[in-house]
Image (cartoon, rainbow, N blue to C red):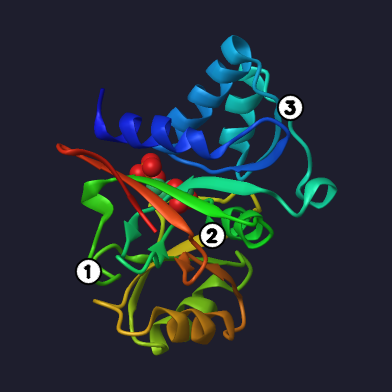
Amino acid sequence: MNFKQAAGIQAAEAVASGMKVGLGTGSTVYYTILELGRRMKEEGLRFTGVPTSEATEKLALELGIPLAELSELEPLDVTIDGADEVTQGLDLIKGGGAAHFREKMVAAVSKRLVIVADESKAVGKLGAFTVPVEIAAYGWRSTAKRVEAAGCRAVRREREGQPIVTDNGNYVLDCDFGLIDDPGALDRQLKGLLGVLETGLFVGMADAAYVAGPEGVRVMR
Ligand code: 5RP
């Protein structure tokens, strides 16, 4: 079993029958969702999920997990999601999969946010991983200039020369601010810029993180 699998499977213990559950996006929470599907079939677990991306929606539907719209179900009991960086204080950078807009919306209406990660994601300070910032496609170069003026180098995320378009029809800037002293202040600053829709800085939102390494899975709270 690899580390992502170990963390993902163990964190599924946060879900009990009858719960309303936010389902995150990425290769670690993938294992959580598989485990929830297994428990549904083999142990009679019953819950309703809210997916944070089209990819997660597809996976959940394949597993037969009942889904609902966010607004139909909020508040949610728990959301389980991955992260690109997690600090000891449980601040996060997310958005490596370009799903951070929906992930933050779902996390914001969840009573608990549980993170799953391998230990390469545990950091002392956020910022070695560039901060994903979702921006409107319209006028994106102007927005990128405003974001760079906040103190970073911003690169539009692309694949094979084509922009990555999020599930919401927007672009993502990957922003290198270096190590970040005050992620909450940076998040507020970026959110105040015209054209910026959401950042991958999740500050004060997570309640626990299941982090897996060679010694097993440790739960940070
Ligand atoms: C997607 C995310 C992911 O949760 C994050 O990128 C971690 O992904 P993985 O578990 O595949 O490393 O924020 O937007």
In this figure, which residue is indicated by the disc labeled 2? 171
Q: Earlier in the sequence, mark 2 or mark 1?
A: 1
- In this rendered view, identify the residue nearer to me: 137 or 35: 35
Could you say where residue 66 lies in the image, as x and y percent from the top left? Answer: 74, 27
In this view of the protein, which residue sits in the foreground, 202 or 219? 219
The amino acid type, in three-letter code, at marker 2 is Tyr
Residue where numbered disc 1 is placed? 124
**Residue extending furthest right?**
72
Q: Nearer the viewer, residue 40 or 123?
A: 40
Going 32% across and 31% down the picture, which residue do you hit? 6
Amino acid at the residue labelled 1: Gly
Contact flag, marks 1 and 3 (Cβ < 8 Å): no
Cα distance in 3D space between marks 3 and 2: 30 Å
Residue drawn at point x = 57 percent, y = 53 percent: 103
- Residue sticking out furthest to the left: 214
Asked if residue 108 shows in the view, the reply is: yes
Closer to the eye: label 2 or 1: 1
Q: Residue at x 55, y 51 (%)?
A: 165
Sequence-earlier tag: 3 or 2: 3
Mark 2 and mark 1 residues within 8 Å of each other at the beta carbon: no
Identify residue for label 3.
Answer: 66
Question: Relative to residue 220, is residue 190 depicted above or below?
Answer: below
Q: Left of 107 or right of it: where is 124?
A: left
Amino acid identity at mark 3: Pro
